[in-house]
Amino acid sequence: MLESEEAARRLGVKLSTLYAYVSRGLLPSHRTPDSRRSLFDAGDVEALARRARGGRSTESRLATVTTAVTQLGPAGPVYRGTPAVDLATTVPYEEAAELLWQADPPSPLGWRSAPLATPPPTALGASDRLRWAVLMAGSADPLRSDLRPQSVVAAARRLVATMVSVLARPEHPRPPPVAGAAPRGPDEEFALELAGRAPQPGTLARALTARLSPAPSTALVRAVNAALILLADHELATSTVAVRVAASTRADLYDATMAGLAVVAGPLHGGASQLAHTLLRDAERLGPERALDDTLRWQRHLPGFGHTVYQEADPRGIVLRELVEPLASPEQRRVLEAVLALAAQRSVPGPNIDLALAALTIAGAMPEDAGRTIFAVARVAGWTAHYLEELGERPLRYRARAVYAARP
């Protein structure tokens, strides 16, 4: 059953129009037990949508997907009934992921990386290391085709931890070695960590921050944890659809995650924060006016601004920017405020999560692609939740209809 806001969104109408449909008998409504809200059957909504299109099917629609994972609204995503903006500052990422997965019983302390034999090649960048981790974790799982929910959740925990563990450490001074001990190379440190003999981080956010920033302070870990939660899921984003399509063929979780990572690699999805990162760096170097003008000249839009779901500012970005502000230097805050002010003066759509993620990576002295890394790691939680949900649907239900047009 759909709530009023979701039914109106699927029909592409305002709430007032939805209620007019109900009063005219075009759409049945059902009251909740407390009689405070109206609910709508997804099939009835889809039937009305088809009639509104004159009986024509929408070519871009692969299937009607009814989900209980995440609901989108003006206040941001709601995970299983709990707003993500509330979770972001109150729980670790692991707990938010367990909520999305409806793990029974939850096991936020059971996140251990897969026992990989070797570290990734040193020449690999962060995106390639994440894909390498998924490939190797899958190859190390002897029962990767076990699609029972508890097995999928256990695999997801290992997978996320493994993805973080293979990321290259930032180049910064290391603490002096213990007297009398032989220095360790990076490969030996990697092997010790995966074998469980090295000190384990308390949370996944702490481990990820240590891989991305040369100065992983408590405040920075808190901001990275919030970013992971805020980015964990966003309903049927393009990468999530890819994962669900893979699940519909009954591909295992590792292969489905590879499908999601392939879509995230696009600059219009997971890579959007890197474009926003470049915008802020250009604003530091050239000034906000020059940076925004040059970006508009070559890209025709401002990365980090506007969103298809949120008419105003992205609520996820607001929460994250508040956590980033005390981490940024006075100059970084000045540049960000100037960019926001100039965009507002020209009625540019409100800032989104990508701009906040870019500000986080700059304040944390992270690589320019760190935002994409955080995004990809975070989204595995949502992908897994949708993967599990899709396993409950009939297989192979995604089949778009092509309209053949001969070329002259």
Image: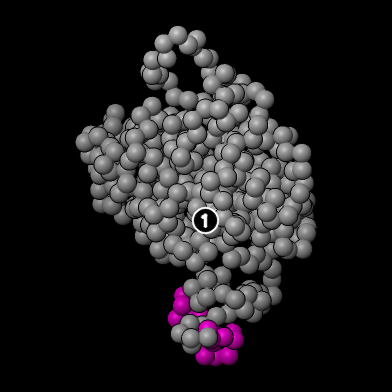
Residue at screen point 57% across, 31% down: 196
Q: Nearer the viewer, residue 196 or 250?
A: 196
* Residue name at image x 57 percent, y 18 percent: 188
Residue farthest bottom in this picture: 24
The answer to whether residue 188 is above or below residue 214 is: above
Q: Is residue 143 left or right of residue 269?
A: right
| Residue under numbered circle 1 | 234
Stretch in magenta: 14-32
**Mark 1 falls on what kind of element?**
loop
Q: Quadrant of residue 84?
A: bottom left
Q: Is residue 355 left or right of residue 81?
A: left
The percent position of residue 164, horizontal first and vertical second, equals 54, 35
Q: Residues within 10 Å of mark 1 (few under 14, many from 20)?
A: many
For the N terminus, give its image quadrant.
Answer: bottom right
Rendered location of residue 226, percent (x, y): 41, 48
Residue 146 at what x, y percent from top left? Answer: 76, 49
